[in-house]
Image (spheres, rainbow, N blue to C red):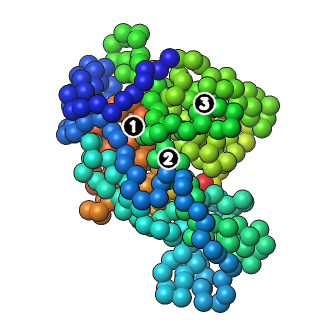
Amino acid sequence: MAGKKKTRPFVTGLVVLGLVGTSGYLTLELRKQEVRGVAEVRDVGVLAGAGGKATASWPTGEERWTRHENPARSVLRGADGQVEAVLTDGARTAKLTGPARTFAEPTSTASKVSTTDWVRLMPRPWVKGAETQKWFKAWYAEVAGSTEDDVFAFASQYVAGARQQKDGKGVVFAGDANFGPLNTSGAEGGDLRLEQSDFYDYLGIPYAFRNGAVGTPEPMRARSLDCSGYMRMVLGYRARYPLMASDTSGDGLPRTANGMARSKQGVDVLPLTGITEQDRPAAIDQLQPGDLVFFKLDARTGPRLDHVGMVLGHDTEGHLIFISSREEVNGPTIGDIGGVSRLDGNGYYAKTLRSAKRL
């Protein structure tokens, strides 16, 4: 079973550094990162799931819709001209404006993301003119101004120190997650922790996919989520986006980062053109909170993309930050251990970014 992760003092961060440095895989020394400690995200604002719904109704004529391109999308603005919703053609994730909240991880990064962006999943993909359809009117009336958990709230519920939550059957569906069990093979150049921990491994219960396949959890992976398993937990199990049993069976969000990046699901806001350094996207202006971002980190995986995260937003210094599950921190993080979590500039992850998708 995966070891229990706790918030530890700074000295533990140094121990982790030593282990990763000897693993031969994505060493922290090569990334030249300053270590501040083990990751812990603090919720500042309405992130505990205790919020309610503001009274909302379909626009009365004060709001107005506009159309934009690259990617094609509809934007709803209020009477004050401020953006209230961004809805992208072919995507189910909607970026809405709501109460302000702050994401911070003081033990591992100085970055702090203060935002009014909320990301929610629509019942069906957006199409031009859908603002006049009954399904959208009903959905928007329910979510406009709501402080019930959104995609970002879900994501924050698996970081170091997150409180454990159980459903009516006693299944733990949220709480501090590991990346995966320690790799005890002792192979030179091996990973510090094992990948392949999916959302049902975290849950510890079998999961029946829509195509009839059943995911069977491995006890040693309990409470663990690798990078793609984390995205599948947040977007799939929690937000209810359909999930594939693998990269090739079923329909919905594939199992791996590579499968997700190359899938026909959603909209490619930064199209994948290749995996080399020359294939890094030239601009990231099209990215918005909630987008999935894909990276090429490890030469051992050949042509496959091997890491995925989610755009969280701009920090207070103007840098675009993402959240993902990483082996160096042993779980979900926005911290800088193992690579600065910035998509702009020339940091480790910025240089290895290859594509992005809006589901």
Mark 2 or mark 1: which is in front?
1
Tell me which corner region of the image, top left, top right, bottom left or bottom right, holds residue 135.
Answer: bottom right
Residue under label 3 = 203
**Viewer-closest of 111 and 267:** 111
Residue under label 2 = 155
Does residue 297 sit above or below 187 in this rendering?
Answer: below
Tell me which corner region of the image, top left, top right, bottom left or bottom right, holds residue 276.
Answer: top left
Q: Looking at numbered disc 2 in the image, what kind of residue is underneath it?
A: Ala
Residue drawn at x 37%, y 48% as measured from the top left: 42
**Viewer-closest of 64 and 97:** 97
Tell me which corner region of the image, top left, top right, bottom left or bottom right, holds residue 75.
Answer: bottom right
Residue drawn at x 24%, y 51% as measured from the top left: 110
Q: Are marks 2 and 1 in contact (CB under 8 Å)?
A: no
218 sits to left or right of 330:
right
Can residue 340 be seen from the camera position used here?
no
Q: Looking at numbered disc 1 in the image, what kind of residue is underneath it?
A: Ala
Query: Which numbered tag is attached to residue 160?
Result: 1
